[in-house]
Amino acid sequence: MLGAATAAHQVEGNNIYNDYWVQEQVPHSTFNEPSLDAVDHYNHYKEDIRLMAESGLNSYRFSVEWSRIQPEKDAWNEKEVEHYRDVLRCCHENGITPIVTMMHFSSPKWLISMGGWENPEVADLFASYCQRLVRELGDQMEYVCTINEANMRLQLAALIKEMMHRMSGQQKAADQEKTNSKESDVQVGINLNKENMMLGMMECAKAFGLENPMDMHTFVSQCTPEGDLLVMKAHEAARDAMKAECPHLKIGLTLSLHDMVARPGGESYAEKEWDDEFLHYLPYIKNDDFLGVQCYTRKFFDKNGGADMPEGAPRTQMGYEDYPAAIADVVRKVSESFKGDLIVTENGIATDDDARRCEFIKEAADSLQQCIADGIPLKGYMYWSLLDNFEWQKGFAMTFGLIAVDRSTQTRYPKESLKVLGSLIEK
Ligand code: BGC
């Protein structure tokens, strides 16, 4: 499978019932700008899928927006289910295999108001939503990812702890600089250096009907060790419920992974990081049909722990190193312990230089081709992203897309890189 990926909240527009919308709209939001119409994929999906098919791509990873289906806890919006049926149908009509993600970071607002991803009820609530959705649409589906980057919460927890420390005024100015540069340590676009962050958090908590900002547990927020494992419970419950409904589905989750590089003395730090990021989740995913591997860059470790990238190394717009070989290194490393099929469900580069994107894609694809030649069961590659889109707190400035969009008219401008990716398919 060769294709591209998107996520509902980043492309659809007007996801007014989810937690991101709430956080984008408060007066002291940490978001650079709100998503609003995004790139109106909700209304332009036919054109977007057609452009993919015309370029030669044969698969599309997208997500269903839970808050559209269940805008209230006990609601079920059939009209929105029909929308996703149309999207699935459109994929099939264009010879595109859909890979459907059930939850890609955004949650319904009501879920956060009731304790979000730290409330044990989340596992059953998520599983029920998934089960009912596949009861209605499962016949159109083949590959399903339950949760996107199910390991993201733990990665963020460490960063957020540091940020809270700074907001409490205990961090020295020199260390503040360091914390800001850590934004690029996690994959998802976040801001750690906005003014009035505490005020913004209090406004958000209020909008969710919570008194204490520390009780606000969106998927992309601070988390306890129990909250981390709750995500695994939600995954297992959803997987089993969907299997019971539609045994033909191939079900897995996706993980955000880094190529860990140890310099002399940094071996144990690199191992520990890999353990936290990947091995620690193995018991919960070992019976899955596949694993979605997502990787964008590498991380360095020396005798002092986390270390800087090489001097003068090229950087992406996101601040981390532009290093296309990372994805194949990670696929190889994962295949040592995960024995099921692998799909690269995300990999890509944020750059305004599309010629560089073309090179990045070719280099990544060549190194992955070698993995397949070596017998690794790698079944597909989904470039992130199909469209220039809403990179969470960073807004629309990060351009990962194969297709540019003029948001004032929602006109699509396919880039050369779309052609390059499509041309890699074996006819
Ligand atoms: C996420 C995407 C995000 C991408 C690029 C991944 O962390 O799944 O939602 O846009 O990386 O930063």
Image: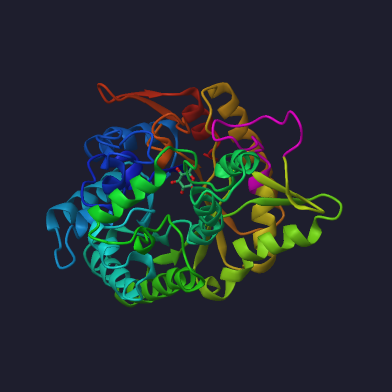
Q: Is residue 321 magenta?
A: yes
Q: Nearer the viewer, residue 312 or 340?
A: 312
For residue 147, what is the image quadrant? bottom left
For residue 266, what is the image quadrant? bottom right
Q: Which residues are magenta?
A: 309-327
User: Residue 216's spot in the image, x, y percent?
Assistant: 35, 60
Q: Nearer the viewer, residue 212 or 82?
A: 212
Q: Residue furthest right?
A: 264
At a point 45% along the width and 70% down the height, the residue shown is 227
30 lies left or right of 191: left
Q: Nearer the viewer, residue 348 or 160?
A: 160
User: Residue 30's spot in the image, x, y percent?
Assistant: 39, 41
At a point 15% along the width and 68% down the height, the residue shown is 74
Counting labels gives 0
Q: Is residue 410 magenta?
A: no
Q: Main secondary structure of the magenta part?
A: loop
278 lies left or right of 269: left
Q: How is the image coloured?
A: rainbow
318 lies left or right of 336: left
Q: Residue furthest front?
A: 169
For residue 57, what is the image quadrant? top left
The answer to whether residue 117 is visible is yes
At a point 30% along the width and 33% down the height, the residue shown is 39
User: Residue 304's spot in the image, x, y percent?
Assistant: 78, 53
The answer to whether residue 372 is visible is no
At a point 21% along the width and 37% down the height, the residue shown is 43
User: Residue 75's spot in the image, x, y percent?
Assistant: 14, 64
